[in-house]
Amino acid sequence: MKKLKFSAEERTKLKHLGVDAVILFGSRAIGMAREKSDFDIGILVRDPKIIFSPEKKSTLYDQLYDILSENIRQLVNIDIVFLQNVSAELQAHVMKHGKILYESDPNAFPNFKEQVMLQYADFAPLRTIFQSGTLSHIQ
């Protein structure tokens, strides 16, 4: 399996782009990847407002893709997601199985994990109601 390690130049670029953390998740993070498995990459940005501007998000995505594809040097899909803008389930998966590839701030990923746990706990009663309702319609 290809191990990702960013050069000093790439780390400087990531910091300049406002990236707080780059996290590998999915099959490559849990050791289940095959040769042609894609790279699932989660991004934490310093200023989450940037991902709600389509133009800025697209520019950032393209720059991240260039950095990652240069680093990976393999003909595989690279799936980049902005973790502040994905489902709670995906956030929980990344929190549990994600591997940090880069952090500009050593508290970025721990802070993300704390936020996800709090949100997950806040919505636990609603998930229970939804699951009970769904199961009652199945039976």
Image: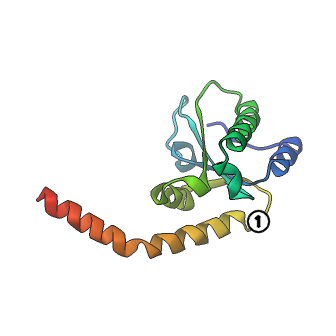
Amino acid type of the residue that numbered disc 1 sits on in the rendered structure: Pro
Q: Quadrant of residue 39?
A: top right
Q: Residue at x 73, y 68 (%)?
A: 107
User: Residue 121: x percent and y percent?
Assistant: 46, 75
Depth order, front residue of 62/55: 55
- Compared with 115, 23 (above or below) is above
Outermost left residue: 139
136 to 73, vertically: above or below: below
Q: Is residue 14 left or right of residue 108?
A: right
Q: Residue at x 71, y 51 (%)?
A: 50
* Residue shown at 64% from the left, 50% from the top: 52
> Which residue is at 66% across, 50% downward?
51
Quadrant in the picture for the N terminus: top right
- The quadrant of the image that shows the C terminus is bottom left
Q: Which residue is mark 1?
A: 106
The image shows residue 58 at horizontal and vertical percentages of 68, 38
Corner quadrant of residue 106: bottom right
Percent across and percent down for residue 92 are 50, 61
Q: Name which quarter of the figure residue 127 lies in.
A: bottom left
